[in-house]
Image (tube, grey):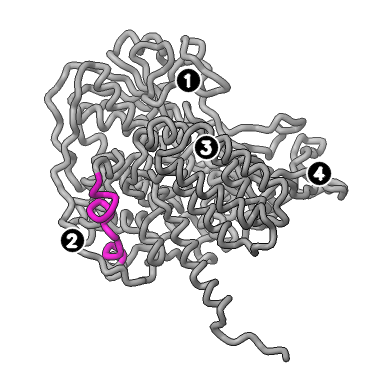
Amino acid sequence: MRRLNEKGNMNERIDVVLHRFRSRMRSYPPGMCPLALYRSLLQISMNQTCGKCVPCRDGLVEVDRLLSSILGGSATEETLQKMEAMCRMIAESADCAVGVMGANLILDSLEYFADEYDSHIQRGRCVENVHQTIPCITLCPAHVDVPGYVALIKEGDYAGAVKMIRKKNPFPTACAMVCEHPCEKKCRRRIVDDPINIRGLKKYAVDQAPADTVPNPPKNVSTGKKIAVIGGGPSGLTAAYFLALMGHKVVVYEEHEKAGGMLRYGIPEYRLPKKRLDEDIRAILSTGNIELKCGVRIGRDITFNEIREKYDAVYLGLGAQIGNRMPMDNADAENVIPAADFLQLVANGKAPDLTGKKVVLIGGGNVAMDAARTAVRLNADTIHVFTRKRDDYTALMSEIEGAMQEGVRFRTLLSFLNIEVNDENQVRAVWLQPEIVGEYDMYGMVKTEHSSNYPYRFVCDYLILGVGQRSDTEHFEKSGIPVQRGRIEADTACMVKDMEGVFSGGDCVTGPSTAINAIAAGQVAAYNIDEYLGYSHKVACDVTAPPALPNPCIPTGRAEIEEKDPFERREGFDFVEMSMTYEEAMREAGRCLRCDHYGCGSMEGGRGE
C-alpha cells in the first residue's frame, strides 16, 4: 500500500542535520591538520556505503585504519605505499561513486599534502606552524584584531575600535566601505547561525568616530633616515604611515593630482565616497614625517636611479591602474575601452555620455561590476555582461546582485571572438561563440569547449573590457628592477630581487588584487624596511580589548547593511549603503564568540600574527 511522505520523516530530519553540518564545514578553522580533515571526509564516505561491494564496504575501512596509524605516528613508508595501493584498487573496482570518490579523495591528499604525510611518518607530528588560529584574524591579510575592535564597539568605544584597527590597517574607513571581508569566511559563528557582519560593524565604528578625528599613536623619536615611497595608493600610504610612526622621514611620490590610487580612481563614488576616503588620508598624513608630492611621474619628472641615490630605502607600491586590451583586431577602436580606464575617466570628471547606448561588458570581476554599475548611472540604454563560464564571475556576490537589481543583464557560456567596427572605426557589434561545459580542472574550475551552435552577432555602441589591469613598470625595468611578465619580482618580505634597499608590494608584485591585500603588503614592507635600516620598532596602540564574556550561542539573525532602493540608486552616484542602527550594531557585536579568548585563541600563537 502506497503512503504519502509524513511531515518530518527520517529523510527530512537528516536533511536538517546536513544543512547544519554544512555550516560547520564552511567554518572549518584555519591551522587544522589536513590529514585529520581528510580522515573525517573519508569516514563520511564510509557511512554512505550501501555495503554491496567489497572494495567500498571493506576497503574504505582498511584505508581509514591505515590513515589513523599515520595520524597516530606509528606508520612507516610501507604503510603509505599500502594505503595508496588500496585506494587505487578501490577507485578502479568499486561499483559506484561512493567508493570511487572516497578513494580518490585520499589519493588527492597524497599529492596535495605530501609534506604533511612525510612529517607524520618521519617525526610523528604535523609540519611546523600547523595549529589552530583565530579565523578572522588569520584570514584578514593585515591580521587586524577583529575580536578586539568588535568588543570595543560593543562597549561603545568607537574611537578605541578605530585605534585597534589602525594598529594594523590605516584605512579603516575605506575598508569599511569596500573590503571583501575575507575575515568572515570561516567565522566560527557559522557553527551557530551566520558569520558576524564584521565589515558592517567596522562601518558603524567609523560612522560614529571618523578616522580623522581619532588621534594616531605617538611617533617614535626621529631616526634621521629617509625613505621614498613610489605610489600614493593603499599600499604606499600604508607603508608611509607605519614608517612615519617608527620615526623615519617619508616622501611619497604620486603620479595623480591626489593620493588614494585605485581607491580614488578605480572605485566609484557610490561605493566609496571620496570625502570618506579623504578622512583616512588626512589621518595618515597627520602622523607627521610624511611629505606627499602629487603630480610627479617617475621617469618623466625624476628618475628612479635619482631617487635611489637620495634615500636610505625605497618602496614601490605602484598599483595596477592600466586596463588591459585583448589581443585582437579592432581592440583599439573608438568606443572600446578597458574597464579600469573607463572608471578613471569617470573619477576625473570626464565621463562619456552613454545616454541611449547599448553597452557590452566582457568580464566578471569586481572592476567589471563597478564599470557595469557606473554605465547604468551614465544613462546607458542597456548593459549586457558576457563571460565564458560561471567561474569567471569572481566579483563579490553582493556586487553581482546589486548590478542585477539595477538592470544589468548577464549571459554566460559565451566566448568573445572579435569586434566589428563601422567605417568611422567605431564599434557596432561583437561576435560571440556559444560554449558548453566540460570537466573540472584540478582547482575545481570548470572547463568549456565550443558548442556546435554558430557564432552570433550582438549589436552594441560601447564596449568595456573588464579583462584585468597591469602596472606601469616600463621605466623601473629599464632602471634595473627585475620584472617578470609585467610584475616586479619581490619575495614575501617585499624585498626586490637583487636590489639592495629596494622593496615592493601590492598589485605591482601580485597582479591586480584587493585593497586589503595591498594594505597588508605595505604593512609588511614597512616593518622589513625598518629592520633593514637596523631597527626593530613597535607601533604603539593605547587601547586594549575589553574582557571576554561568556556567549550562550543562542542562534540569532545576522544584521545586514541595508541599501537604497535600486531605482533610486541608479539615478546618480550617491553612496548606496545605509548605516546600521545602534540596536543592530549592539546585537551584532554581541554575537561575537570571542575566539581570541575561548578555544583556539587561548593557544600559543593563536592570534595568527
- Which amino acid type is shown beneath numbered disc 3? Thr
Residue 141: percent from left, percent from top: 38, 40
Q: Which residue is mark 4?
A: 450
Report crowding for label 3: few under 14, some 14 to 19, many 20 or more residues within 10 A (C-alpha). Answer: some
Q: Which residue is mark 2?
A: 155
Magenta part of the chain: 588-603
Q: Which residue is mark 3?
A: 79
- Which amino acid type is shown beneath numbered disc 4? His
Alpha carbon separation for disc pair 3 and 1: 42 Å
Counting residues from the N terminus, which is met first, the one under dot 2 or under dot 1? 2
Nearest the camera: 569 or 141? 141
Disc 2 vs disc 1: Cβ atoms closer than 8 Å? Answer: no
Alpha carbon separation for disc pair 2 and 1: 45 Å
Residue 3: percent from left, percent from top: 68, 89
Residue at (22%, 57%) from the top-left corner?
151
Q: Which mark is residue 446?
A: none
Closer to viewer: mark 3 or mark 1: 3
Alpha carbon separation for disc pair 4 and 1: 37 Å
Residue 61: percent from left, percent from top: 56, 53
